[in-house]
């Protein structure tokens, strides 16, 4: 029995018209937006520049007032002060006070949440650890690079252990390490049951971390749905396997031709993602203790960012949340792909069919924060690429959909 | 309260670290410490201290007003640089944010005003110790008695001249002096004219004549060894070539069982002078009788035929000590602080509506209007009278419009001059607690609360992410 919960965000017919000095309509930034963000999901707000993403977020936060339509956050108005205690916000730029040092910045925002001094200090320390800036905690923010300021921006957004996190272009201005860390944090928080609204035009970021997305263009909603559903190419099948000999490939081709009456279109070696390759180089440098005045490898997501109370919608998610709520591993370790047991079994069957190849690359990634890999890490396999073919190979013909969790690698 | 204090702390940190406040602090310090070396007053110790305190306090007041206006840019800066996005998306109400900014400004003002006051106090003692003496003992005593003290003033009690005016009016009627008076003749006004004539006559003392002055409500310590002061200024006609008039005084009512003291004075004409009177000359009913004789009783000196006039514009008064200089200073600082509190609220109101340059100009305008309100009001009334018959003309129309606008402002902008106690303080007069309480009620409880409330309301309704100029 699925427990129905109040949506975290609900908008109905939301419109925002910017007017000129004479109150004449100048720009209609958001038009008739209907949005629902459910508890515990990572929701992506996609769109090109000027599509209304930031305006929507500003209306959700009460920084702008809707021209028409209705917004509810946790069932209340965005201007309700009590609602804001449950929200964390990272704006598209790091609007921090240049004259405060990092620790004071977090302490200031902690005071606005009326956190006791001890809690403020503890959380500030842990968050600075998490964003890799503990060693720069006494430097004025004005001296920080843009990326370092973004990290402090993220830390302040988490100061209150928010149930709902709004991230506007979170990876903007960050180097690949920072971007990766932010994504890891989002994943980790998502697993802890936090509701996250991620606004970005960095499509890869959204694809990597979001459960559902909506795409805005010209202030209007053009598409909405689960990432897997929106992106799945149902007319193409991709099988990822360890490097195969020409003889084996011939056998596979014959097998596919015999069983499916069609030819394989392309056989190639997959490329490692540039982000993964870059991370490997940096991790090697860090392992060699090369000095830097910038941000360092981030630490674990602090324990105080407990699971959100409104996160559970059914028993499966409850189980996932419970499992990750006690996870104290470093961020990089938390960011391991979730391996669906069914897909794993399918791969084993495929390996057996193909002659029992080495499955080392298929195993979950090691903790990159502790040990640099010796070879470029292969991209996490899209294990649910086409479950029907795997099912056919396994002799399973029931046509059930793949587990959703495996889409997020 | 903790949220308001968090905003206030941020404001203070910003003021200090962005060096806005520090620049003003340095300016205040330079003025206060530098003044004694650049001014000397009338070369006497009292003159030097009075000039220093007067300029020092006025400069402090002006610089802190400027600081308050400049500090308020913090709010408009936060909106322009969008730092406010992170604050107002936290669980803090808009009114708490505005109040926090105001509290932060006031804490800085309070600290700077306190520092400035301590410096002025220290410098007064420095001047006292180092000023080149003309008559060191006399100078120091004069300073203690007339400046470094809090005295209350009781003006002379005017006799009721309305009866005399009534009698003269009736006599004139009987004599038929108003028989040919025009239709516009107003008996009431005529009686008032006659009353003033009698009063002026009473204020003039001819050569060899005397006058009795009564003072009431002198609520002071009357124990032996304590003194009160008679302060007066006499316009003298036909004065001697040395410009010094001689007079004879008696203090104490012989019919009220108090000792009577006498003194002969040689005083420069047309200047204020002070005579110390033993306090036991004051009767049990807290009255003091002073008898003045326009006579030269110095032996061997000739009687000069000069006429003395004690004008109503230069009040004859008895001054008596009611408190210490230090507490008087504190009460003066309170009045200065109340004005800054109002100005801070105005500055914040302006920054919630306008961007900084416009807000700064608007706040400064309010400061100037508040400081010159009496003058502006008088000027407006005079100008309105001049134009009253030609409302149809363009200049008349604009003047009338401006007058209406000014009357609107008049309602909310206080008269700072009414609470300007520097002159009072510098002349060793008590800045009364009632005055301070009245200032608190008017400037803080009414005007500041209204302006701050308006600022909160406007800021609450404002879309902080909307671009404005």
Image (cartoon, coloured by chain):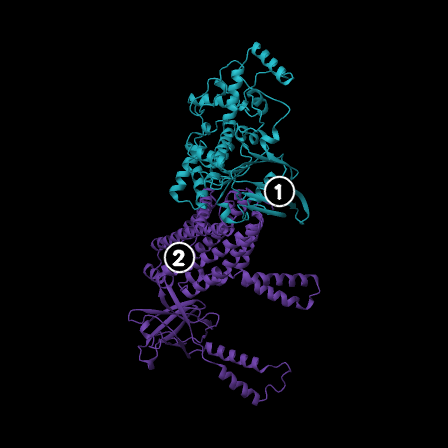
Chain colours: A cyan, B purple
Few, some or many residues within 10 Å of mark 1 (<14, 14–19, 20+): some
Identify the residue position indicated by label 1 in the image.
A34
Q: Is residue A102 above or below residue B238?
A: above
Asked whether A330 or B342 is in front, the reply is A330
Q: Are marks 2 and 1 on the same chain?
A: no
Residue A378 visible in the picture: no
Q: Which mark, by number, is residue B49?
A: 2
Residue A398 placement: quadrant:
top right
Whether the residues at callouts 2 and 1 have beta carbons within 8 Å, the answer is: no
Q: With A407 as the anchor, is B35 left or right in this view?
A: left
**Circle 1 sits in a helix, a strand or a loop, which is it?**
strand
Few, some or many residues within 10 Å of mark 2 (<14, 14–19, 20+): many
Asked whether B368 or B49 is in front, the reply is B368
Residue drawn at the location 55% of the way across and 11% of the way down = A245
Question: Residue B32 placed where, x, y %?
Answer: 42, 51
- Chain letter of the residue beneath label 1 in the structure image: A
Q: With A262 as the anchor, is A361 left or right in this view?
A: left
Give the residue at the far top of this rendering: A247
Residue A130 placement: quadrant:
top left
Asked whether B171 or A146 is in front, the reply is A146
Q: Which mark, by number, is residue B109?
A: none
Question: Residue B112 placed where, x, y %?
Answer: 42, 50
Question: Residue B374 placed where, x, y %?
Answer: 54, 63
Q: Nearer the viewer, mark 2 or mark 1?
A: 1
Give the residue at the far bottom of this rendering: B174
Residue A225 visible in the picture: yes
Residue A249 placement: quadrant:
top right
Residue drawn at the location 47% of the way across and 59% of the way down = B444
Q: Is residue B336 above or below residue B154?
A: above
- Chain letter of the residue beneath label 2 in the structure image: B
Q: Marks 2/1: CA distance?
A: 74 Å
């Amino acid at each position: 029995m699925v427990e129905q919960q109040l949506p975290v965000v609900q908008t109905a017919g939301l419109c925002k018209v910017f007017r000129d000095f004479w109150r004449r309509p100048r720009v209609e930034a958001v038009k008739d937006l209907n949005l629902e963000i459910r508890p515990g999901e990572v929701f992506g707000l996609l769109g090109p520049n000027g599509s209304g993403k930031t305006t929507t977020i500003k209306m959700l936060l009460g920084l702008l007032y809707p021209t028409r339509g209705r917004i509810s956050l946790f069932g209340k108005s965005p201007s309700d002060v009590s609602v804001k205690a449950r929200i964390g916000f990272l704006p598209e730029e790091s609007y921090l006070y240049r004259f405060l040092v990092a620790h004071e910045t977090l302490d200031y925002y902690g005071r606005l949440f009326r956190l006791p001094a001890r809690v403020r200090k503890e959380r500030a320390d842990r968050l600075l650890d998490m964003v890799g800036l503990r060693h720069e905690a006494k430097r004025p923010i004005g001296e920080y690079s843009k990326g370092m300021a973004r990290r402090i921006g993220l830390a302040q957004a988490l100061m209150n252990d928010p149930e709902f996190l709004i991230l506007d272009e979170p990876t903007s201005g960050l180097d690949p390490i920072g971007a990766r860390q932010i994504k890891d944090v989002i994943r980790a928080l998502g697993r802890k049951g936090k509701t996250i609204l991620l606004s970005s035009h960095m499509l890869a970021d959204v694809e990597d971390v979001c459960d559902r997305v909506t795409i805005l263009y010209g202030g209007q909603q053009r598409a909405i749905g689960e990432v897997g559903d929106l992106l799945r190419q149902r007319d193409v099948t991709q099988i990822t396997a360890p490097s195969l000999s020409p003889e084996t490939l011939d056998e596979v081709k014959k097998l596919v031709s015999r069983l499916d009456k069609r030819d394989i279109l392309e056989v190639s070696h997959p490329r490692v993602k540039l982000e993964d390759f870059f991370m490997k180089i940096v991790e090697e440098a860090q392992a060699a203790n090369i000095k830097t005045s910038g941000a360092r490898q981030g630490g674990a997501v602090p324990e105080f960012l407990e699971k959100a109370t409104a996160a559970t919608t059914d028993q499966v998610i409850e189980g996932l949340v419970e499992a990750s709520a006690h996870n104290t591993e470093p961020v990089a370790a938390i960011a391991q792909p979730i391996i669906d047991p069914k897909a794993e079994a399918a791969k084993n069957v495929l390996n057996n069919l193909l002659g029992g190849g080495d499955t080392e690359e298929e195993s979950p990634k090691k903790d990159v924060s502790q040990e640099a890999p010796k070879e470029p890490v292969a991209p996490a396999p899209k294990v649910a690429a086409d479950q029907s073919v795997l099912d056919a190979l396994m002799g399973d013909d029931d046509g059930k959909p793949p587990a959703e969790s495996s889409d997020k690698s | 309260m903790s949220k308001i204090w968090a905003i206030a702390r941020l404001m203070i940190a910003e003021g200090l670290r962005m060096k806005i406040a520090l620049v003003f602090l340095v300016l205040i310090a330079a003025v206060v410490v530098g003044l004694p070396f650049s001014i000397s007053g009338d070369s006497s110790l009292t003159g030097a201290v009075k000039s220093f305190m007067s300029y020092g306090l006025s400069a402090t007041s002006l610089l802190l007003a400027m600081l308050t206006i400049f500090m308020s840019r913090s709010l408009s800066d936060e909106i322009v640089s969008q730092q406010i996005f992170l604050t107002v998306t936290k669980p803090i109400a808009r009114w708490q944010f505005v109040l926090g900014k105001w509290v932060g400004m006031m804490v800085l003002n309070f600290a700077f005003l306190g520092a400035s006051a301590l410096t002025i106090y220290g410098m007064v003692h420095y001047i006292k110790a180092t000023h080149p003496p003309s008559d060191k003992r006399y100078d120091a005593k004069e300073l203690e008695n007339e400046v470094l003290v809090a005295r209350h003033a009781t003006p002379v009690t005017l006799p009721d001249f309305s009866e005399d005016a009534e009698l003269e009016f009736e006599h004139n009627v009987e004599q038929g002096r108003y028989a040919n008076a025009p239709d516009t003749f107003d008996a009431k006004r005529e009686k008032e004219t006659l009353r003033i004539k009698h009063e002026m006559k009473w204020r003039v003392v001819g050569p060899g004549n005397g006058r009795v002055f009564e003072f009431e409500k002198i609520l002071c310590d009357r124990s032996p060894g304590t003194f009160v002061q008679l302060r007066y200024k006499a316009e003298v006609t036909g004065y001697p070539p040395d410009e010094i008039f001689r007079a004879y005084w008696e203090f104490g009512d012989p019919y009220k069982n108090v000792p009577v003291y006498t003194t002969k004075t040689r005083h420069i004409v047309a200047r204020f002078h002070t005579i110390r009177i033993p306090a036991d000359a004051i009767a049990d009913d807290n009255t003091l009788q002073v008898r003045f004789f326009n006579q030269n009783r110095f032996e061997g000196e000739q009687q000069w035929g000069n006429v003395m006039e004690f004008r109503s514009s230069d009040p004859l008064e008895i001054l008596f000590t009611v408190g210490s200089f230090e507490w008087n200073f504190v009460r003066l600082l309170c009045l200065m602080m109340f004005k800054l509190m109002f100005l801070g609220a105005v500055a914040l109101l302006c920054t919630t509506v306008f961007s900084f340059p416009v807000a700064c100009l608007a706040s400064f305008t309010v400061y100037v209007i508040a400081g010159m309100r009496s003058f502006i009001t008088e000027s407006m009334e005079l100008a309105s009278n001049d134009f009253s018959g030609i409302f149809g003309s363009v200049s008349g129309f604009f003047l009338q419009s401006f007058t209406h606008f000014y009357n609107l402002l008049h309602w909310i902008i206080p008269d700072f001059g009414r609470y300007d106690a520097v002159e009072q303080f510098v002349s060793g007069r008590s800045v009364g607690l009632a005055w301070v309480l009245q200032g608190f009620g008017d400037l803080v409880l009414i005007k500041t609360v209204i302006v701050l409330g308006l600022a909160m309301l406007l800021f609450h309704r404002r879309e902080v992410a909307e671009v404005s100029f």
